Image: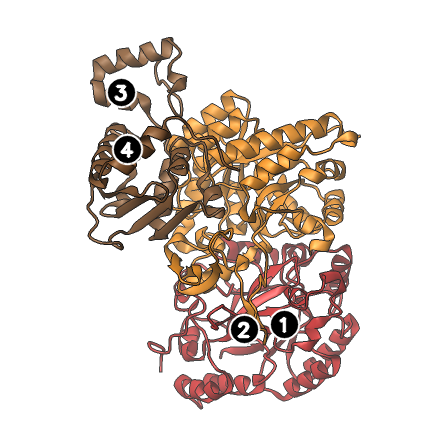
Chain colours: A red, B orange, C brown
Amino acid sequence: MMKLSLGPIQYYWPRERVMDFYREVERAPVDIVYLGETVCSKRRELRPADWLELGDRLAAAGKTVILSTLALMEAESERLALESLARNGRFLLEANDATALGVCAGAPFVAGPHINTYNAATLAELADLGAVRWVMPVELSRQVLSAMHAARPAGLETEVLAFGRLPLAFSARCFTARARNVPKDACELACIDYPGGLPMATQDGETFLTINGIQLQSADPANLIGSLPELMDMGVEVARISPEPEGTLEVIQAFRDCIDGTRSSAQALERLQPLFPRFCNGYWLGDAGMRWHEEGLSA
Amino acid sequence: MSAHRMELVCPAGGLPALRTAVDNGADAVYLSLRGETNARNFPGLNFDRKALAKGIAYAHSKGVRVYMALNTYPQPDLWRSATEAVDTAAAEGVDAVILADLGLLRHAADTHPDLTLHLSVQGSATTADALNFYHERFGVRRAVLPRVLSLSQVGQVIQRSKVDIEVFGFGSLCVMVEGRCMLSSYATGESPNTRGACSPAHAVRWVETQRGREARLNGVLIDTFAPGENAGYPVICKGRYRVGDGQETLYAIEEPTSLSTLDILPDLLGIGVRAIKLEGRQRSPAYVGKATRVMREALDACHADPKHYTPRPEWAQQLSGMSEGRTHTLGALHRAWQ
Amino acid sequence: MPLPKPPVLLPLGVALRLLPDAVHTRVFTALVNHLLRGQPAAEELGPLEGKRICLSVTDHRGGVCFLVRGQGITPWRARGADDWDVRIRGRLEDFWRLATRAEDPDTLFFSRRLDLEGETEAGLYLKNLLDTAEPDWEGHIHAVLGERAGRRMVRLLHRLGLGRHLPGGLHVTDP
């Protein structure tokens, strides 16, 4: 049976909002929950101890908890925080850069979506390092995954981002601070004002990207619910949902129904359509990531 | 005072550029085989095996080293050509290969234990621990840092790193962590990671309209240039957009500007940087010649007397004349830019 | 910064103004095809096969259009303003500086002195072909003069030290 995971929150939410969200997640039908700040180390509404406490609560509710690391490590303090995270003694880490790979090597860990895993030789290398699961980079297609699965090391699980805005790029610069016309060092944690990021449109008014601090995301959430049967056939063990400010619990339920077979993927898609203006799934189908193809999906 | 010298590493998109770089004072050149195994996969650019042999022979005859970049992340359909490219590099006698992919690093380390390995900027390693991971695991000897760190951060990395550090010294500026940017494939289906192409040419259209010259990428309007306004490469990060509810258009990500480290060469020398790289394998021999000559003079002046080094105005003038955006920045090396 | 005009451009500019484009095109294509003989670049025209390419000189009201065919080019008479796949527009002086590799095309592009319209990929291929092709003068001389006379000529040029004055240099395989 395919497992359902909830990725780390990519946005900067006030502490109470995070707590409320995870209280609901305790009761939501997900199997795995990834916790932690992956985008910007200046976002400190929750301290490491708070994340661990949240982890304990979710674990008590029957979830498998994994702690996600920063995608871009720059400062000495971030490395020290990572090393202490690795010594938590309770939860595995999701490594999101080579610093974390070095720290995790030799013990079981998850190779996150920001580790560039584009071929079977890299899968073998990750397995050799101790990876028990890898999360497919978002720009890969079903053809590539199927070719990689043909030579996947035994015991290495595959996880695919099945719903949520695509993390597309990380920078040294903060685009939210830039939009507010302040330097990054004086950002005053402006991200907290944008629980779903800041939309960015082209000059002819097309929504195009989402600004989220030092990260750029797709404008619309990726949605592979229509391809879920295909993912299961291909032997993908985990489908990941990335938290959005609204509608995440409904998304979880729709995916759960689809996995349990109580709803077809077409029905599940229909249920999600009113909640979001648009979706994208181009990457999965081998097209430009921004594209949305409804036709040709398995019913 | 530092005893070491910084190596000048220059781009070569073809044989004429290689000869020009060598003749104008490069210590090393970096190049690629044709195809999707390198991050500058432009139509008609780069070396076939015959040109590679000629290029290596010419460079080596003048005491100049040759590095081959194989810095995409080959997907299964490209795996064979990528490993063959590593094998070709070893057989032809390049002085190092510049890699990013974990699987390819493994192949190179196991198959060619004597081949020197550099970690590409596309490897996204931004900390000493990340670099040491690559060193201990694959024997990587040098790494190119992504253009996201400040000068003091670069210094901290060097202090704890077991590999030599190379930094970009001049050229078009990538504002994202290299190897972590999928903006191009989001719009076109092809990215530096997957196909060695950022804004692949087949997806680019320049259209003259009444409002000015539109740059479109697979239909997405990246920017509109008023008549006479300087243009940049048609990449998503250098376009102008609307943010939030605002109606004005702005460079929401980055201005089209170029990186230049002419002003801080003694600082880079002082913190222990081992090599300075010039960007621009897609540029012409005319650019390579000028950029190499300017940086050679600047480095010689810096090495001779770092304490009293002052960049000559004509250096900056010559470089900015050829630059994207025709303005310069220290980029992330200057903390305030971040 | 305006550059001093090379003296060669003066008669070229006058010719562009006085002669019909058909004449420029014939002269241009004959010259290019002549230069392409025996060149590795001629073998790499494949991706441009069938492309209609127009070079349009903005300051002298003229230009040439040609069609890439096989290992050379043939004159192309455009049947309207948009009858091309790639159009490169610029001033005569800038075209000259490109042809002699004195200027970098991207530099001209950034400063809006050069426009590339239409199929960007074909245009970029053409640009990179010109940038990366190393003129094989030895091969060219052999192709034009024949094997024996060609070899004598190459040796002569090399011995007299004239080879290095050819654009890109004469790189002799067997001096």
The answer to whether residue B195 is above or below residue B118 is below
Residue assigned mark 2: A165
Which badge, 3 or 4, is on the more N-terminal residue? Answer: 4
Judged by depth in the image, the label closer to the viewer, 3 or 4, is: 4
Label 3 close to label 2 by CB (< 8 Å)? no
Residue assigned mark 3: C141
Q: Residues within 10 Å of mark 4 (few under 14, many from 20)?
A: some
Label 4 close to label 1 by CB (< 8 Å)? no
Residue assigned mark 4: C15
Q: Residue at x 29, y 46 (%)?
A: C54
Q: Chain of mark 1?
A: A
* Residue C100 location (% of width, % of height): 40, 30
Q: Amino acid at mark 1?
A: Gln
Q: Amino acid at mark 2?
A: Arg
Residue assigned mark 1: A10
Label 2 close to label 1 by CB (< 8 Å)? yes
